[in-house]
Image (cartoon, helix red, strand yellow):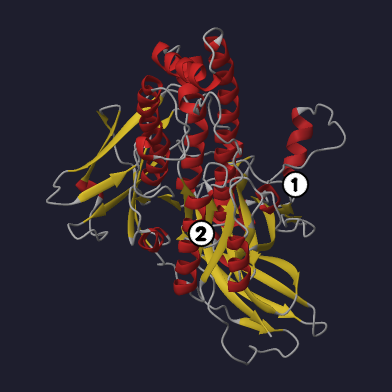
Amino acid sequence: MRKSLAPSRAVRPIAPLLLLLFGITFQPGRSQNPVPPQSPETRASIHKNAPELTSHDAPTTFSTRVSLVMVPVVVRDRAGKAIGTLHREDFALFDKGKPQVISKFSVERAGETAMVVQTTVDENAGEKPSGPPPPPVANHFVAYLFDDVHSNFGDLAQARDAARKQIADTLQPTDRVAIFSTSGQTTLDFTDDRRAIEETLLRLRPRLRQVVNPCPDISYYMADLIVNRNDRFALSAATLDTMACMSIQFGAEEIARSTASQMLSEGDYETRLALSTLKDAVRRISAMPGQRVLVLVSPGFLLLDSHRSDETDVMDRAIRANVTINTLDARGLYVSPELDASKRATSYQAQRLKSQYLRESAFAEGDVLGELADATGGTWFHNRNDLDQGFRLIAASPEYTYVLGFSPQNLKYDGAFHTLKVTLKNPSGLALRARRGYYAPKHEVDPKQQSKEEIREALFSREEMKDIPVSLQTQFFKPSDIKATLAVLAHVDLKAIRFRKAEGRNRNSLVVVSGIFDRNGILISATEKTIDMFLKDETFAARTAAGLTVKTSFDVTPGNYVIRLVVRDSEGQMMTAQNGVVQIP
C-alpha cells in the first residue's frame, strides 16, 4: 500500500501566494473500530503469529534528536571573498554571553551537489533507451519577493528595472526564477520562461495606502511611541502638526491620539502581511530541490515586540531549509527627511520633531532587512544607489557558508530572546557575519511532528546523506506514446542498521519516501511507505543478508525528471537521501 503526497493539480500558480504553496503531511492511520482490551495470553499469541514483514501507509514515530539552534556563518577575506577552509575548532559561539559547545558543524558550498543520471530500463525494449542526454537539471532557484505594500512607485520601479536587467543578463539553463509580492497580487511560480518573467515584473506596482498630504501626518513609528510607549514628545509633535494643518487650537491632542491609534492598527496589519508573505515564500522555495536564494526587495518595515516571534519563525524555517535570504533596500541612498519636497509644510517646531522621528523610523525599518540577511548568511545591500550592482550581488549565495549547531543548556520555554555571538579564535583580518540571536520556544516541540518535518525537509533538499547503504534504480513502461509508468526501486542493505529485540523478534521500521520533480524542480508526486520488520531469529540472518527492495510507481508522461529518495529507520534514527535524473523518451 502507498500514501500519495502529491499536491492537487487543480491549484494553479495565481495570486495570492498561498495558492502556490503545498504542504506534505504524514497523517497516521486511524482505526475505525475500537479494540477491546486483550489478556497477556492473547497478546503473546498475536506476537507469536504476527507476520515478519508488513508494509503500510502509517508512518512510524521516531525519537528525535535534541533540538538544535542552527547558526549560519559567512567568513570573508580582505577582498570580500567568502572562504571555506576553516574548521569547527576555529569558531567560538556564545549564547547570552555563555560559551556553547558546537555539536554540529558543516561547510556548505554553493552549487556543490551533483546530479547522477540513473540507468533507466525500458521494460518494453529490455534495455537502456538511446537518444540525446537529458538537458541540464534545474539546481539554482531564486525567488524575488517585492514589497509592494511599503514601497513607493519610484523606488519599486527602479528596483524592478534593475531586477529585469540582472535576470536577462545572467539566467542560466540550470536557473529557475519566481516572482512574488507582499500584497500577493503579482505572482509567478518558478520558471525559466524569460517572457513570463518580464511580463510579471512589468505588472509590479505599489499597493500601499494612497493618502495625499495626510493631516495629521503620523507614521507607524510615531503611532507606536504614542499609543504603546506613552511618549509625550511624540504626542506633542503630532499635536502641533494637527494644530498647523487643521488650523485649530482646541481638541488637537484628541485628534492626534485617535489618528495614532488608527495608524498603529494599519501599520500592524501591513507588517504582519509582509511577514506572512515572507514566511510563505520561504515555504515555497524550501520545496525546491537545490540551491535556494530568496531576494527580499523592500524599503524595510517596522517590527514591534509583538512581531518578533514571527520574524524568528521565518529565520528558523529558512535556516533549516538552507534558504539564504538576501535583502536589498529599495530606497537606495538615504535622504534626510528635511530634503523631501513632497512633504506638506507645517510649523517649524513640529517639523523639527517629526524629522527626528522619521530618521529613527528609517533606521528601524531597515534593521529588519539586516537581521534577516545576517540570520541566514545572506547579504544586505543598503544605503547605495547602484541597484544594478546590488542585484548582481544578492541573486547568488555566498560560495561558502558554515553552519554551526548547538543545543542550549537548561533552555526555558519562555519565549525570551537569546543574543548570539560568533567569533573567530584567530581573526587575522577576516570579517565574519552570523545570526544575531533567536527566541526560545514557548513550549516543547512535539517529537512526532518534528520527525515528520525532518523527513519532509530531506525530501525537498538536494543534500546527499548515506547513513544507510541504499542503491537506487529506475524502470519505466510505456503503454502509449503519451503515457508511462516510472518505477523507483530502493534496495536497502539491512546489515547496516540496528534491530531491537522485542517479544522474541528482531524489530525495526523503515520509512521510504520517493518523490518525482519536473524540469523546473516542482514536485509532481511523492509517495511514503512504512515497512515494519518483526523478524524471527531463524529468518533474521537470511533476510538481513538479502536486503530489502521497496518499489514505488508513478504515472507520468514522457520527459525528464529528478528523483529524490529518502530512507530512515526507527531504531538507529539514521537517514539516507539520494538524487537521480531519469529520461523517458
Foreground mark, 2 or 1, reads 2
> Of the numbered discs in the image, which one, if any, rests on residue 160?
2
Marks 2 and 1, how far apart at CA = 64 Å
Question: Can residue 547 be seen here?
Answer: no
Q: Is residue 359 rendered to the left or right of residue 196?
A: left
Q: Position of residue 318 (x, y in %)?
A: 48, 47
Quarter containing the C terminus = bottom right
Choose the circle earlier in sequence order: 2 or 1: 1
Q: Residues within 10 Å of mark 1 (few under 14, many from 20)?
A: some
In the rendered view, tell whether residue 318 sits above or below residue 109: above
Q: Is residue 108 rendered to the left or right of residue 238?
A: left
Question: Can residue 356 be seen here?
Answer: yes
Q: Which of 58 and 572 lies nearest the eye of the viewer?
A: 58
Q: Amino acid at mark 1?
A: Ala
Which residue lies at the image location 20% right of the left edge and 48% below the top edge? 90
Q: Position of residue 195 (x, y in %)?
A: 61, 72
Q: Which of 400 and 444 lies nearest the eye of the viewer?
A: 400
Q: Amino acid at mark 2?
A: Arg
In the rendered view, tell whether residue 453 sits above or below residue 141: above
Q: Position of residue 415 (x, y in %)?
A: 47, 23
Q: Determine which residue is flagged by label 1.
A: 50
Which residue lies at the image location 45% right of the left edge and 36% below the top edge? 66
Which residue lies at the image location 25% right of the left edge and 27% below the top edge? 97
Quarter containing the N terminus = bottom right
Which residue lies at the image location 58% right of the left edge and 48% below the top edge? 206
